[in-house]
Amino acid sequence: MKDYYSILGVDKNASQEDIQKAFRKLAHKYHPDKKDGDVNKFKEVNEAYQVLSNQQKRAQYDAGFGGGFSGDNFNGFDGFDFSNFDIKFSGGEHAGGNFADMINSIFRGAMNRGADAQVDIIISFEESIFGAQKKIRIPYRRKAEETIEVQIPAGTESGTALRLSGRGEPSKDGRSQPGDLYIRVRVQEDNNFQRHGGDIVTVLELMPTEALLGAKKEIRDVRGEKLIVVVPKMSTDGTTIVFSDKGIPRPAGTGRLVVLCKIVYPKSMTGKVQTLLESLQKEGW
């Protein structure tokens, strides 16, 4: 059996006035219309008050016959008068005589709410970076399929689920709130770029001579803009050259473009090249 006194935060010898004050305070705190409200807590507080505010029910409860007042047998707020309580809604209006009807409506609406729907889409790497407007076909179960336009936000990562409130399956009774639509996004791999958080990584292939002597190489970033990469002398496999603000746009700031150097050796060499390498080897190279 639930401890209704503990739920309301009052002593077992509390007066009706104390019980009413405690209820008002908790009902206002957990009211479902508040941003930080809690429907389950609100229901529990009202359940406790409905018993303890009634002298006969309270006496039965105190005598140990409270099984009839358990949460499993609680029948909402029928017969309970909220008209004397000054509870404010977020819009500034006060609760009145229709308060019980409103609460029952909340619970009925939650039970009859439409199911959530889900659809998977594939977008290009470029679309994931800069965002895109996509047309998506939604195959509903309880109504005809439809095509909607969705804005894919810039910087969307693979595995992201976009939620569209009220665009899911219709409710069973046709009056309650529809479910939500979840769009699960998968990003295609790109041949030239990889994403790491807010940074974009691209590989720059270098000949051994370019790595040893240094070089200037032209590349294009993810926006298609030309960039000159200055490769320092004596570069090795894994040397990185970083361009700030050339990565992924994010609320905290645009990420970086990281150029990763990779030395590529020729598949064959001429006799002249071999002779030069052999002479370098003799000198300790």
Image (spheres, grey):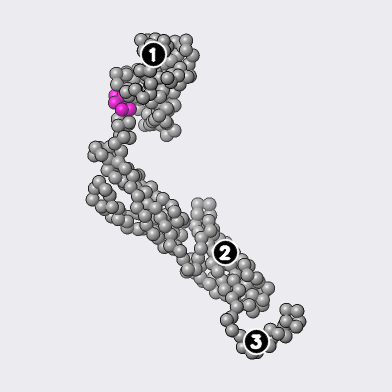
Q: Is residue 46 magenta?
A: no
Residue 283 is labelled as: none
Residue 81, percent from left and from top: 32, 18
Residue located beneath label 1 in the image: 65
Residue 91, percent from left and from top: 37, 31
Return the residue nearer the eye: 64 or 258: 64
Q: CA distance from mark 3 to mark 2?
A: 33 Å
Residue located beneath label 3 in the image: 273
Q: Is residue 103 magenta?
A: yes
Label 3 Cα crowd, 10 Å radius (few <14 / some 14-19 / many 20+): few
Give the residue type that dot 3 points to.
Val
Q: What residue appears at the point 49 percent right and 14 percent down from the top-left corner?
A: 11
The residues colored magenta run 97-104
Is 203 drawn above or below residue 148 in the view shown?
A: below
For the image shown, how many numbered marks are present on the structure? 3
Label 2 Cα crowd, 10 Å radius (few <14 / some 14-19 / many 20+): many
Q: Is residue 114 left or right of residue 236?
A: left
